[in-house]
Image (cartoon, rainbow, N blue to C red):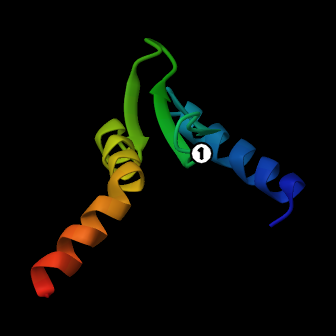
């Protein structure tokens, strides 16, 4: 999908969501570099839903940081 196609698709999604007083945004999480999707209430600016959640981003970061230790632990217990 080209960036133009993605932009057009996002505009259509936001047009439909505006009927429900919400909008969707896409961003890249600074720490993990992962794509994050947020659905926000346009009246209150309240976050309705985030995919992946903050907890999932934290867990993924933790796994990335400790992967070597986890692999070593698994291999050590198998031996």
Res 20 visible: no
- In the displayed orientation, state which residue is furthest to the bottom: 79
Judging depth in this view, the residue of 67 and 24 nearest the camera is: 67
Q: Residues within 10 Å of mark 1 (few under 14, many from 20)?
A: few
Q: In this image, 73 relative to 9: left or right?
A: left
- Quadrant placement of the N terminus: bottom right
Q: Residue 71, position in %: x, y?
A: 29, 71
Judging depth in this view, the residue of 27 and 74 nearest the camera is: 74
Residue 47 in the image: above or below residue 49: above
Residue 59 in the image: above or below residue 17: below
Q: Residue 22, position in %: x, y?
A: 50, 30
At x 80% / y 50%, what residue is drawn?
8
Residue 20 in the image: above or below residue 76: above
Q: In this image, 73 relative to 1: left or right?
A: left
At x 26% / y 64%, what residue is drawn?
70
Identify residue for label 1. Answer: 33
Q: In this image, 75 relative to 65: left or right?
A: left
At x 85% / y 54%, what residue is drawn?
3
Q: Residue 13, position in %: x, y?
A: 63, 47
- Count all numbered tags in the image, as a single digit: 1
At x 47% / y 27%, what residue is drawn?
40
Task: State the SS at label 1.
Answer: loop
Res 70 visible: yes
Quadrant housing residue 78:
bottom left
Judging depth in this view, the residue of 47 and 15 nearest the camera is: 47
Q: Residue 48, position in %: x, y?
A: 37, 31
């Amino acid at each position: 999908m080209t960036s133009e196609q993605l932009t057009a698709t996002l505009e259509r999604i936001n047009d439909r969501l505006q009927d429900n007083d919400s909008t969707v945004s896409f961003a890249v999480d600074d720490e993990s570099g992962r794509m994050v999707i947020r659905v926000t209430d346009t009246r209150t600016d309240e976050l309705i839903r985030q995919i992946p959640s903050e907890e999932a981003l934290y867990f993924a970061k933790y796994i990335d940081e400790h992967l070597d230790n986890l692999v070593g632990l698994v291999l050590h217990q198998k031996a």
